[in-house]
Image: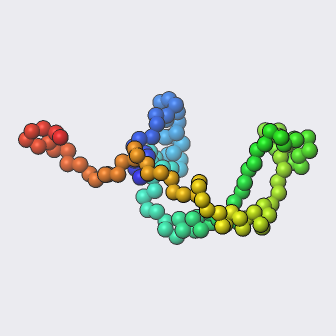
Amino acid sequence: MHQVTFDYQERGASESFIASSLASALTNYPPADALTGRLLVDKPDEALIRTLLDSMVPSNMNVAFASPAFNESQAKHRERHYEFGYDEEALSPELIARFEKASGFGLEPPPELTFVPRKLDLVDERAGKDGPE
C-alpha cells in the first residue's frame, strides 16, 4: 500500500521544492533510497508495530478540548510561541474506564474504500496479437 501511496502522491509545490527536498533526503538516506526514504517501509518490524498498537489504549492518550467558552484570562498555562492560554489536567479514572468499555457508533471499522485499488498484481506489458486489452 505504501508503494501505491508513493506512486499516486500529489505533485509538490514546485520543482525547486522537490530539488531541495531531495538534497535534504540525501543527507539522511543513501542515494538509492532518497526518493522513498520517508515513505516506503521495505521491512516492517512486527515487534515494533505490535508495541505501537498495544500502546493505543485510553489510559495512554492525550485529549484536547477547545471551547469558545474557555476564559483565557483564567488559564493556568500560557503557550509561549503562539501566546494562548490553556489548562492541563489528568483524565479521571472513571472517564478512562468509560472509554475502555465504549462501543457503538463511531467505534466501528470505516466503510469499504471504494476507490482504493485491490488488484495490484504485475501486468504483462506485451500486447496480444489483437493489441492491448
Query: How many numbered marks does the figure carry?
Result: 0
**Residue that appears at 54% across and 42% down:** 24
**Residue that appears at 16% across and 44% down:** 126
Q: Residue 122 location, x and y as percent? A: 26, 51
**Residue that appears at 69% across and 60% down:** 61
Q: Residue 1 location, x and y as percent? A: 41, 52
Farthest-out residue, right = 74
The front one of 66 and 30 is 66
Farthest-out residue, left = 129
Q: Residue 75 location, x and y as percent? A: 88, 46
The front one of 79 and 89 is 89
Q: Left or right: 75 with respect to 106?
A: right
Q: Is residue 39 visible?
A: yes
Q: Residue 26 location, x and y as percent? A: 50, 46
Q: Left or right: 3 with respect to 99?
A: left
Relative to 42, say whether 73 is above or below.
above
Q: Quadrant of residue 94?
A: bottom right
Q: Is residue 16 visible?
A: no
Q: Quadrant of residue 91?
A: bottom right
Q: Left or right: 50 with respect to 80?
A: left
Relative to 120, say whether 128 is above or below.
above
**Residue that appears at 49% across and 40% down:** 22
Relative to 6, say whether 103 is above or below.
below
- The quadrant of the image that shows the C terminus is top left
